[in-house]
Amino acid sequence: MRIGELARRTGVSERSLRYYEEQGLLVSERTPGGQREYAERAVDRVILIQELYAAGLHSKKIGELLPCMRDPDGGPNERATPELVTSLTAERDRIDHMIADLARSRAVLDEVISAAAREL
Amino acid sequence: MRIGELARRTGVSERSLRYYEEQGLLVSERTPGGQREYAERAVDRVILIQELYAAGLHSKKIGELLPCMRDPDGGPNERATPELVTSLTAERDRIDHMIADLARSRAVLDEVISAAAREL
DNA sequence: GTAAAATCTGACATCAATGTCAGGTTCAAG
DNA sequence: CTTGAACCTGACATTGATGTCAGATTTTAC
């Protein structure tokens, strides 16, 4: 598929898709004319990238992480270096804190929303 | 307490504390010389503000939300307008999505970390 | 072949919280 | 009184992903 379709199917802008490629997170073939052609699996890949961004990982870290994931087709993947494991563990802990904080914020919102509902 | 102590106790920079005040999220008395003097409860307030920022709320929304929270001392608080309730409900839903996304990202990291551990 | 739609590259803009720095003032301790 | 630490205001810089635009090229439909 070309970039427009991938953008539509993932909800990610074309601009961002080109940026992901520039950052080495996403690969594409090129048509003879030079336009990007994506495999079907790019859809899941893009969604994953977005989720990792939302989790606060930066491009560089995502770029290190992605090759170490088990491919869905069981293809070869890189081995995570000890340094990467250390850094990913830190990220995981940070995400745990983030989830806990989010739960607290959610409770705050919920309390205000509920209080307003009770006053109707 | 003055700004330095509040910064130290909350882990938030003095710069940010002044910014919060500028945004109307945090109040302070002033000494005769013009320096900020904070009440003890400012500590919890600052931590709450940070959590709401982390949850993706912007200054404006936090500024609308805070007065509608029940004060710990049961003091008077503003009533949430229907528009605010609508917007807070949307934020809450967004936070729910965010938590779900974070859980997925966490699982991805965990899988890579675990796989590396198994290879030792 | 032609026109419209899609894509390309490259550059510049944006956002919002925070960092940083300069020059001046206030506070606390000797 | 003096000195150093803490604080003040105001301004400018930073960050990193994304928006946006211009001008050129490719693809698709007729």
Image (cartoon, coloured by chain):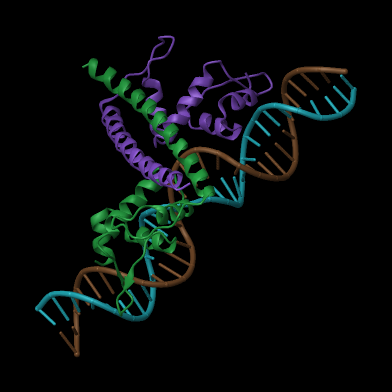
Chain colours: A green, B purple, C brown, D cyan
Question: In which quadrant of the rendered image does the N terminus of chain B lie?
Answer: top right
User: Horizontally, is B65 left or right of A88 in the view?
Assistant: left
**Going by the picture, which residue comes out furthest to the top?**
B74
**Going by the picture, which residue comes out furthest to the front?**
B120
Percent x, y of residue B39: 56, 16
Identify which residue is drawn at 52% across, 29% down. B21
Vertical arrangement, residue D18 with respect to residue C17, above or below: below
Q: Is residue A118 visible?
A: yes
Vertical arrangement, residue D6 with respect to residue A85, above or below: above
Q: Is residue B80 visible?
A: no
Percent x, y of residue D2: 89, 26
Vertical arrangement, residue A21 with respect to residue B68, above or below: below
Front residue of B1 and A36:
A36
- In which image quadrant can residue B91 be found? top left
Vertical arrangement, residue A88 with respect to residue A42, above or below: above
Front residue of A79 and A45:
A79
Front residue of B78 and A83:
A83
User: Horizontally, is C26 left or right of B66 in the view?
Assistant: right
Please state the total of marks drawn on the protein image: 0
Percent x, y of residue A60: 48, 54
Front residue of B104 and B49:
B104
- In which image quadrant can residue A6 be found? bottom left
Percent x, y of residue A42: 29, 59
User: Horizontally, is B18 left or right of C20 in the view?
Assistant: left
Identify which residue is drawn at 40% across, 60% down. A19
Identify which residue is drawn at 30% across, 31% down. B92
- In which image quadrant can residue C2 be found? bottom left
Identify which residue is drawn at 33% across, 41% down. B104
